[in-house]
Amino acid sequence: MTDSAHVYLLEHLRQAMSEDDRVSEPNIRVTIAGGRIWLNGQVGSDERRKAAEIVAREIAEKEGMVVRNDITVMTVTGPTVETLG
Amino acid sequence: MTRIAAVGDIHFGTEHAGTLRPYWSSLHEHADLFLLAGDLTRVGTAREAEVLATELSVVKVPVVAVLGNHDYHSGQQEAVVSILREAGVTVLESESVVLDVRGVRVGVAGGKGFGGGFAGACATAFGEPEMKAFIGHTHALADRLERALRGVEADLKIALLHYAPIDATIEGEKRQIYPFLGSYLLGEAIDRAGADIVFHGHAHLGREKGVTPGGIAVRNVAQPVLRHAYNVYCIGREELPALNAKGAVGLDESC
């Protein structure tokens, strides 16, 4: 792929992370390194993590690109307390 | 002291059923009121709202919410509001509510808000109709928020938004997307009308604490920022100190 094709592919992948209803995760980061597509960031469930990879593969593999999924699932804990006063 | 629990951007999908219930079932031990700062659902379907309503059924204190942009995505926002209201949640759409919380009149004025950017780099109502509509929407919502806040007669006044009213609490996001994360018009409206504290979400990569130019404490309670099921803010109007320039306050686990 040419450099300009990479630019457009990355942006199409970023758009898909937001706009594809299987994912809907605008904060997933998509980068290219070592000839591979890398997914990073944090999502709310393992279902979303897997969906992001599926959608990314659908797009990237048409261009012969391999996808690596480094997305993590957010975990939360109990509250902290702040006193304004 | 009134103990306010708050969180935003929980992005509840059908797969999340049961995940927050363990925390929310004991929320009344830590707080007197629960605020939800928008993006309650993943893609804004009625089904997701039903799952969230079931999850919220364990909360034993009043729940007040605003919608976020995700809650509009499927065009089912009216159903989302209706389902949550039927479940006992007060959903504010540029309006206010006053609740008696342990003898304290707590007023919450809120709405989704919208984008436009912040002082020095703000969109203007100039040029194409689409651009005018974009910033016009923010102007309209800021005006309605100001009216809602002015109409509140309470001991404690809270502004609840999804979009950010200041840029300090979205620092960490790419600057290029600031205009899509909030608007100074919201902060200006709040400073004109007055409030004791402002809660918002939307900026997942932002930071929790900030202050309006008028000195009102702002808290970005987006769950990816807090990394907690919710946080608790203890506030009593008569005991409020002057905040420093960064709105910094101490933590007190004893509240």
Image (spheres, helix red, strand yellow):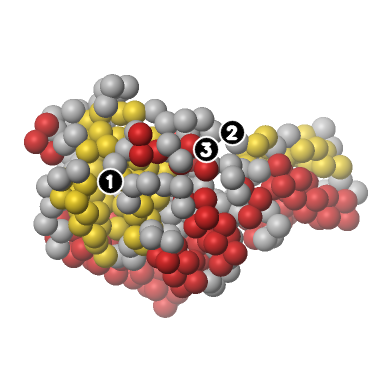
Query: Nearest the camera: A28 or A62?
Result: A28
For the residues marked 1 and 3, what is the alpha-carbon distance in whole angstroms? Answer: 27 Å
Task: Name the residue located 15 percent from the left edge and 45 percent from the top edge.
Answer: B104
In the rendered view, tell whether residue B132 sits above or below residue B205: below
- Residue B85 is situated, as x and y percent measured from the top left of the image, at 40, 65
- Residue B250 is situated, as x and y percent measured from the top left of the image, at 26, 22
User: Which quarter shows the C terminus of chain B?
Assistant: top left
Judge if badges 1 and 2 mark residues of a common chain.
no
Q: Which mark is residue B22?
A: 3
Return the residue at label 2: A75
Task: Name the residue located 31 percent from the left edge and 45 percent from the top edge.
Answer: B33
Question: Which mark is first along the chain, 3 or 1?
Answer: 3
Amino acid, disc 2: Thr
Chain ID, mark 3: B
Task: Name the residue located 24 percent from the left edge and 60 percent from the top edge.
Answer: B97
Q: Which mark is residue B198?
A: 1
Amino acid, disc 1: Val
- Residue A19 is situated, as x and y percent measured from the top left of the image, at 65, 60
